[in-house]
Amino acid sequence: MAQSSQHSSEDEKLKRDVKETGQQISQAVSDTVGNAAGMAADKAREAQESVNEVAGNMRSAVDSSLKNQPIATLAIAAGVGFLLGALWKS
């Protein structure tokens, strides 16, 4: 009987240890995923800011080009449109 009680106690201890280890692993995974998601959101925000900056710069360049060389700007726009149309068709 004493041996059976000892095995039962060891089994309970083992169950508690496994449960605690599982909880620690779950918490570690949750923390890692949370950190990765935060980093991804930061990178996405940085990328969006960069895209906005480039778009603003491009708009300024196009506006300046339209004021200084309207015919050349129109020709470039027509060429780009033609290329995009040819790529779309193929």
Image (spheres, rainbow, N blue to C red):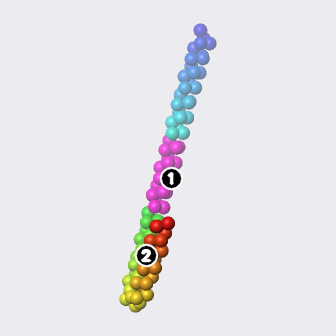
Instruction: Look at 56% across and 19% down and name the residue there.
Output: 9
Q: Quadrant of residue 63?
A: bottom left
Rendered-image quadrant of the N terminus: top right
Tag shown at residue 46: none
Is 8 a magenta residue?
Answer: no
Tag shown at residue 81: 2
Tag shown at residue 36: 1
Instruction: Look at 53% across and 28% down and name the residue there.
Output: 16
Left or right relative to 76: residue 18: right
- Please tell me which residue lies in front, 4 or 40: 40
Q: Is residue 21 above or below residue 1?
A: below
**Amino acid of disc 1:** Ala
In the picture as drawn, the residue positioned furthest to the top comes out as 1
**Amino acid of disc 2:** Gly
- Please tell me which residue lies in front, 85 or 28: 85
Q: Mark 2 Cα within 10 Å, few/some/many (few <14, many 20+)? A: few
CA gap between label 1 and label 2 equals: 40 Å
**x, y percentage for residue 36?**
50, 52
Q: Mark 1 Cα within 10 Å, few/some/many (few <14, many 20+)? A: few
**x, y percentage for residue 50?**
46, 70
Q: Quadrant of residue 17?
A: top right
Looking at marks 1 and 2 on the same chain, the residue that comes earlier in the sequence is marked by: 1
- Please tell me which residue lies in front, 44 or 30: 44
- The residue segment tinted magenta is 27-44
Q: Nearer the viewer, mark 1 or mark 2?
A: 2
